[in-house]
Amino acid sequence: MIRYVRHNDIDVAAWDARLERCANKLWYGLSWTLNAAAPGWDALIDEESGAQMALPWRRKFGITYAYQPFLLQQLGPFAAGPSTTDTARFIDAMPSHIRFADIYLCPGTSGPPMLTEQQNITFRLNAPIEVLRGRYSENHRRTLKKTGETAAGWEPRVPLPDITAFLIGSEQFRKWGIKPDQQQALMRVLSTADERGHGFACGVRSGGALVGAAYFVKWGGRLIFLKGLANDEGRRLHAMHYLIDRVIAEHAGQDLLFDFAGTNDPDLARFYMGFGGERSVYLRALVNKLPFPLNLLRT
């Protein structure tokens, strides 16, 4: 039976131990990741099956709602023996005071009106770099031949303050509408990942300044491209082509899944697919139990 557990009653040691036993475990489901991204998160736990799902929540206009924390792709349910019925089962178990939810979950049974498919792009790194590069698109291979100037500015380990300042100060963050609370979450998550030894930042500099940078998380058999971008100068230098190729080369031959952390943007998806990526799906759950006319509002 699935039970709802408030944050202060969650046994985090047991939570993380169950996650380690889950066949579909992801870094997003670790207690410390959740603490950094969504302080005060609650949980749904089925101890009999070993399945669990985080339930981050907020209140606005007197409405309690579940939300997707910034940087976290999926909240679960994570299970030792995942079933296609898990997503619907856990959604049905959400407590009655959660009247609205817009969250992202592991693959399961999808379909209208509550569950819709979202796109992720991944590929395995367990091959020599020559083989991996042979899977790149012709356009990517041609572009990488032009990155000699970029190579001179390669920095395999960028200090955390440098990358956070680069990301938060970027024109892209402003265009994407990244809010101050999301920026704070980013700094907490990256700081905690660094402290735990699960992440690293790398980048490309030109004239001493970062023009492209990314943060990666390595955990649970995955190498996650958590967040990265290039500014105008970085795009001129094809900095992200070079950066991703270098990270692939450094991890080639390892039993890892390179995970681009999802995108529904067709241009970005095409860029990711150019590295030999393959499409997979996860689910968006949209639950609205608000009465009319509140059910017409979005939190």
Image (cartoon, rainbow, N blue to C red):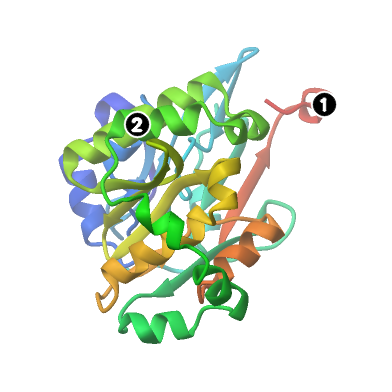
Callout 2: SS: helix
Q: How many C-alpha atoms fall within 10 Å of the one at disc 1: few (<14), some, or many (≥20)?
A: few
Q: Position of residue 4 (x, y in %)?
A: 39, 37
Residue 32 visible to an observer of this rendering: yes
Residue furthest to the top: 61
Q: How many marks?
A: 2
Residue 68 higher or lower than 245, as above or below: above
Amino acid tagged 1: Phe
Residue 221 higher or lower than 52, as above or below: below
In the image, what residue occupies the spot 77% across and 29% down? Answer: 295
Which image quadrant for residue 30? top left
Q: Are marks 2 and 1 in contact (CB under 8 Å)?
A: no
Q: How many C-alpha atoms fall within 10 Å of the one at disc 2: few (<14), some, or many (≥20)?
A: some
In the image, what residue occupies the spot 56% across and 72% down? Answer: 140
Q: Would you say 54 lies left or right of 136 here?
A: left
In the image, what residue occupies the spot 22% across and 57% down? Answer: 20
Q: Would you say 284 lies left or right of 229 here?
A: right
Frontmost residue, 295 versus 123: 123
Amino acid tagged 2: Asp
Q: Which mark is residue 162?
A: 2
> Which quadrant is home to the C terminus?
top right
Q: Earlier in the sequence, mark 2 or mark 1?
A: 2
The residue wearing badge 1 is 292
Q: Position of residue 201 (x, y in %)?
A: 32, 45
Q: Position of residue 139 (x, y in %)?
A: 62, 74
Frontmost residue, 104 versus 212: 212
Q: CA distance from mark 2 to mark 1?
A: 48 Å
Callout 1: SS: loop
Which image quadrant for residue 281? bottom right
Residue 84 visible to an observer of this rendering: no
In the image, what residue occupies the spot 38% across and 47% down? Answer: 203
Q: Position of residue 92 (x, y in %)?
A: 55, 48
